[in-house]
Amino acid sequence: MLDFASLLIAIGFSTAFLAAILLAAWKTTRRDGFLFSCAVGALLIAASVGVSTIDSLSPSTWAQGLGLGLLLAGEAHLYGSAAQFRRGTSPSRRIAVATFASVALLLLALAAGYNGLAYAVGFLASAVLLFLAANEFWQARAEAPMTTLGIASLYFLVGLSFLPRSVLVLLRDGLVVAGPPQNWAQDLSLMLVIGAIPALGAMIMALSQIRTTEAHRREALTDPLTGLWNRRALFDAYQAGFPPSCIALLFDIDEFKAINDTHGHAMGDRVIALFAEAMKQDLPADASAARIGGEEFALVLRDMPMDRARQHAEDVRARFIARVREMAGLECTVSAGLAASGTDKVDIDRVLAEADRALYEAKRSGRNRVIVARRQATPQEPSAADAIA
C-alpha cells in the first residue's frame, strides 16, 4: 500500500502550481474566462487536499466534511469552466447549483452520523461532476478536436476512477469508518490524478493558445467598425478566383466627405456602421460581405441571377436611406455597381474592376442608383442609361 498522505501532498502541490499557471495566463490576456474558473477550481482542490491530508493523519468529522466539500466545490468549478468554454456564458449558476447539490448530499450523510456513506457520496458526486465536465469538452470537440478530446478523455478517466472508490468504501468499510478509506482503488485513483494534472494543464493552456491565435486571425481579417470582412479577408477568400455564377456588388456612400466635413468623423463612422447594418440584413448565408475602403463595401453573391442580385442591391440602397434618416437624422444615399463572374472561374480583380466601372458610371450619372456592368447588360437588364434612381 502506497503512503496515502504522500500521494495527497503530491496532488496538492500539482494542483496549486496548475492554479498559479492558469491564473497567470488568464491575467495576461483576460480573454478566456474559462481559465479563471478552472484556476479557482484547482485552488479549491489544492485546499481540499491539504485538509484531507490532515484528516488522514488525524481523522475528524470536520476535516472530512471540509475536505470533501472543497473537493466538490473545486470539481463544480471545473465543470463550470468546461461549460463556459463551450457555451461562452457565465458559469456562476452552474457552479452554484452543482456545488449546492453535491455538498448538500454530503452534509446530510455526515449529519446522520454515517461518515462512510459521506465518503461514498463524495466520491460518487466527484465522478458525476467530472463526467459533466468531460461531456462539455466532448460537445465542443469541433473546436481543436485533438485537444478537446484529450481533455474530455482525462476528465472521464479520472471521474471513472472515483466509482470503485465509492463502492469499496461501502463494501469494505461500511457506513461508519475510523478514517479515510485506504485501498487499491484509492491508490489507483490518486496516481491517475497525479498523472492527469500536468497533462490537463498543458492541454488547457494549449486550448487557450489556439483560441488566442484564432481570435488574432479573426481580428486581422475583420473590420473593427462594422464587423464585416476587411479587404484582405475578401481577397484571401477568393485568391483562387471567383467561382462560376458569382456576382460582385460594390457600394459607395455618396458625398461621404461632405458628411465628415459637416458633421464630424464620429457621424461619419455612424453612417458607415448603419450602412453595414443595412447590408447585413437579409444577407444570404453563403454571401461574403466586406468593407474594402473608407466608405466602400463589397458583397459577393453566389448562384444568384443578375436580376435578383440587382434587386438585392436596390433593397440595400433603400434600407440604408431609411435607416440613416431614422437613426442619424441625415439624408444620405449610396450608389452600387454590379458585375458577374460568368460561367468560368475568373480572377477577383477582373470582376471587381468591372463592378467598379459600373459604380463609377452610377456616380457620374447622378448617384443614388444601382447599375449593372455594361458587359452584363441584356434587354431584360438595363444598362447604365436605364438605371433606376
Image: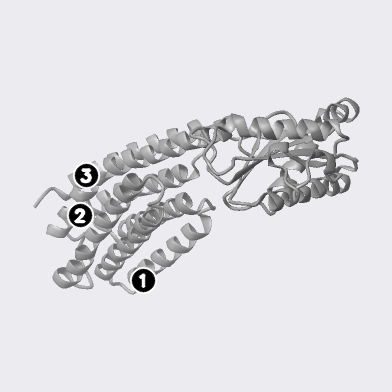
Left or right, 335 with reference to 173: right
Provide the residue designation for mark 2.
189
Q: Nearer the viewer, mark 1 or mark 2?
A: 2
Q: What residue sits 43% from the left and 61% below the top?
A: 99
Give how far apart the Cα atoms at labels 3 and 1 are: 34 Å
Circle 3 crowding by C-alpha within 10 Å: few under 14, some 14–19, many from 20: some
Which label lies toward us, 3 or 1?
3
Badge 3 element: helix
Q: Is residue 263 left or right of residue 250?
A: right
Q: Residue furthest front?
A: 379
Which residue carries the number 1 mark?
111
Q: Earlier in the sequence, mark 1 or mark 2?
A: 1
Give the labeled residue for mark 3.
195
Q: Answer with the quarter of the image where residue 20 lies.
A: top left
Q: Position of residue 98 (x, y in %)?
A: 43, 62
| In-image side of 245 versus 389 (left or right) | left
Q: CA distance from mark 2 to mark 3?
A: 10 Å
Q: Amino acid at mark 1?
A: Ala
* Chain-order first, disc 2 or disc 3: 2
Q: Nearer the viewer, residue 304 or 218?
A: 304
Mark 1, other Cα within 10 Å: few <14 / some 14–19 / many ≥20:
few
Secondary element at tag 1: helix
Mark 2: which secondary structure? helix
Q: Amino acid at mark 3?
A: Gly
Q: Nearer the viewer, mark 2 or mark 3?
A: 3
Determine if residue 15 is in view.
yes
